[in-house]
Image (spheres, rainbow, N blue to C red):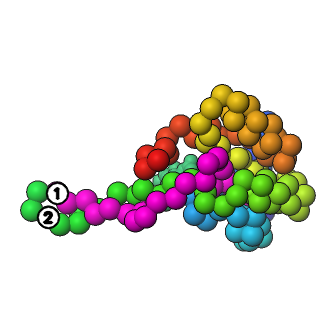
């Protein structure tokens, strides 16, 4: 079988097929299932404080006379507690030490950024995504 191993800035992965940060990467259970199924890496659904949620999550987009030509996605970051996600990152890395796990992060203050970066590193995340793009809706 072909060797698909990758090394992206020191982050190793058995293959270049990674899941983006989104609903399929919202828990350790999902990511472990994905790795069992063959995915090489995952960017965890964005972790943050405070946990804020909204309803509804989708808005219809109308264009001229056409109704609902598309949807605005207004899903925010994870709605699961930070401590649960950090514990699960640790579990995933223990079970899959050779797979890539990137923690996507989004918090509000400088002090919170410093803390969450340390927390994600201590949990074993291989890399960090600083999410400056999803605060819409908050
Ligand atoms: C429902 C939904 C939720 C998402 N949540 C996040 C998120 O929590 N953090 C993040 O960085 N990106 C999030 N994304 C963006 C995805 O990670 C990805 O960048 C985007 O879907 C574009 O990739 P695609 O063209 O493969 O869909 C989300 C996307 C969707 C559709």
Q: Is residue 27 above or below residue 99?
A: below
Q: Which quadrant holds residue 128?
A: top right
Q: Residue at x 61, y 60 (%)?
A: 79
Q: Residues within 10 Å of mark 2 (few under 14, many from 20)?
A: few
Q: Is residue 106 above or below residue 51?
A: above
Secondary structure type for disc 2: strand
Label 1 belongs to which residue? Answer: 63
Q: Residue at x 57, y 63 (%)?
A: 23
Which residue is situated farthest in the left direction here?
A: 65
- In this view, the residue in front, 1 or 69, is 69
Q: Residue at x 14, y 64 (%)?
A: 66
Q: Residues within 10 Å of mark 1 (few under 14, many from 20)?
A: few
Q: Position of residue 13 (x, y in %)?
A: 77, 50
For residue 125, side relative to residue 49 (left or right): right
Label 2 belongs to which residue? Answer: 66
For residue 2, side relative to residue 72 (left or right): right
Give, as a single range, the part of the protein colored magenta: 38-63
Mark 2: C-beta under 8 Å from nearest atom of ligand 1: no
Mark 1 touching mark 2, by CB under 8 A?
yes
Q: Which quadrant holds residue 25?
A: bottom right
Secondary structure type for disc 1: strand
Q: Which quadrant holds residue 35?
A: bottom right
């Amino acid at each position: 079988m072909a060797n698909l191993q990758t090394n992206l800035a020191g982050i190793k992965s058995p293959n270049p097929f990674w899941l983006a940060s989104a609903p399929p990467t919202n828990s350790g259970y999902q990511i472990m299932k994905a790795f069992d199924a063959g995915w090489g890496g995952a960017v965890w659904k964005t972790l943050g404080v405070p946990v804020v949620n909204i309803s509804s999550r989708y808005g219809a987009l109308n264009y001229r006379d056409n109704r609902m030509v598309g949807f605005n996605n207004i899903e925010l970051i994870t709605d699961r507690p930070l401590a649960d996600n950090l514990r699960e990152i640790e579990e995933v890395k223990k079970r899959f030490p050779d797979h890539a796990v990137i923690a996507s992060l989004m918090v509000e203050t400088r002090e919170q950024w410093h803390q969450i970066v340390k927390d994600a590193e201590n949990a074993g995340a291989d890399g960090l995504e600083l999410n400056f793009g999803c605060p819409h809706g908050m």
